[in-house]
Image (cartoon, rainbow, N blue to C red):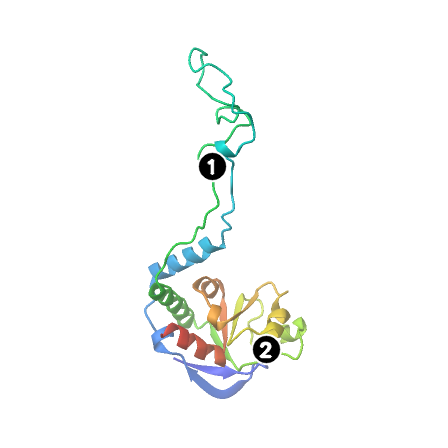
Amino acid sequence: MEVSVLNIQGQDTGRKVVLNDAVYGIEPNDHAIYLDVRLFLANQRQGTAKSKERSEISGSTRKLGRQKGGGGARRGDINSPVLVGGARVFGPQPRDYGFKLNQKVRRLARKSALAYKAQENAIVVVEDFTFDAPKTKSFIEVIKNLKVDGKKALFVLPGADKVVYLSARNLEKVNVMAASALNTYKVLDADVLVLTEGALTVVDQNLNK
């Protein structure tokens, strides 16, 4: 699949790039996408919920009532879960919600997400660019020139570029990330994928190891 390369003025440079069929031309695997998105969302969870168990409550350990004959549930000290202000039984503990997913499955998921974008003609290739200083107005001009304004756009750069990132940070529907950090969730969440020429090379290298 050939795609024309544009400059940041939105003009055709006359050059074309061929999207690698091993990445953008595969048959998408929906189950791999499901697993990778589920892993991404699980890793966003803090997992810091915590309640105190019986041994962690501050209080006397004196047994308050008789073992039998009281007419109610047996209980021990004031930290008992059956009493108001007592401990919680089997409460939440800090945990990691992530799970193991093989690298091959994760690569397949990213390829599948990119293949979907290629099928939808939602990939724009632009020359490598940067700005002299962070300026949101400059980035808005680029978006308008590429005719992706009003859409949720994901700009993928060859590497981390703080100037470009800061220029786009305040824009609601725009995300900027390095090609090495590209993930299935972000690709699918975007309406249009804007790849620089350098980013294309990095994505090919990362997904065809």
Whether residue 154 is situated above or below residue 70 in the rendered picture: below
- In the rendered image, which residue does mark 1 sit on? 91
Q: Amino acid at mark 1?
A: Gly
- Name the residue rendered at 52%, 46% in the picture: 48
Q: Nearer the viewer, residue 121 or 200?
A: 200
Classify the position of the N terminus by image quarter. Answer: bottom left
- In the rendered image, which residue does mark 2 sit on? 145
Quarter of the image where one finds residue 26 = bottom left
Residue that protrudes farthest toward the bottom in the picture: 14
Q: Amino acid at mark 2?
A: Asn
Distance of mark 2 from mark 1, alpha carbons?
A: 54 Å
Q: Nearer the viewer, mark 2 or mark 1?
A: 1
Quarter of the image where one finds residue 171 = bottom right
Q: Residues within 10 Å of mark 2 (few under 14, many from 20)?
A: some
Is there a contact, CB below 8 Å, between mark 2 and mark 1?
Answer: no
Asked if residue 157 lies left or right of residue 115, the reply is right
Whether residue 164 is situated above or below residue 16 in the rendered picture: above
